[in-house]
Image (cartoon, grey):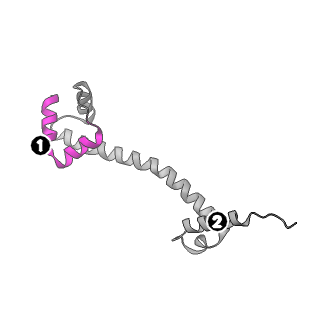
Amino acid sequence: MPRATNSVASKARKKRVLKQAKGFFGRRKNVWTVAKNAVEKAMCYAYRDRKVNKRNFRALWITRINAGARLHGMSYSQFMGKVKANNIELNRKVLADLAMNHSEAFTAIVNKIK
């Protein structure tokens, strides 16, 4: 009886990995062992950077809220403390958008909490 190599599954796996390596430079895109390692590392970076992306956006929102709050004579921490104390249920993403694009609405929030 011939040896069972499960070649259908292994070819499908290689095909999938090489498809994921499309656009890579040099042998990383078409040599199986190099492409496999490159794709695995790329997936690790993608997983990690999805978390980093959330951190970066939160930092951006905080910076924008801080700039808007300082135009009205208060720091970011004072502003957020008063927002929480007055039970204003707006998250940082919305507050940052108001501070950047709708200054009159942000001013109304500041006047309400002062």
In the rendered view, tell whether residue 34 sits above or below residue 85. Answer: below
Residue holding disc 1: 104
User: Which corner quadrant of the image does residue 9 belong to?
Assistant: bottom right
Q: Is residue 20 left or right of residue 87?
A: right
Which residues lie in the magenta part? Answer: 90-114
- Residue situated in front as seen by the camera: 68 or 89: 89
Q: Is residue 72 left or right of residue 52?
A: left
The image quadrant where one finds the C terminus is top left
Q: Amino acid at mark 1?
A: Glu
The image quadrant where one finds the N terminus is bottom right
Q: Residue 47: give x, y in percent of width and height.
A: 51, 51
Magenta part mainly helix, strand or loop? helix
- Residue situated in front as seen by the camera: 2 or 84: 2
**Contact? badges 2 and 1 (CB < 8 Å):** no
**Crowdedness of circle 1 by 10 Å Cα count: few (<14), some, many (20+)?**
few
Mark earlier in primary sequence (2, 1): 2
What element does badge 1 sit on?
A: helix
Residue at 41 percent across and 50 percent down: it is 53
What element does badge 2 sit on?
A: helix
Residue holding disc 2: 12
**Residue farthest front in this picture:** 1
Residue at 14 percent across and 45 percent down: it is 103
User: Which corner quadrant of the image does residue 42 belong to?
Assistant: bottom right
Image disc number at residue 8? none
Nearer to us: label 2 or label 1: 2
In the rendered view, tell whether residue 11 sits above or below residue 90. Answer: below
Instruction: Check if residue 113 falls in the magenta segment.
Output: yes
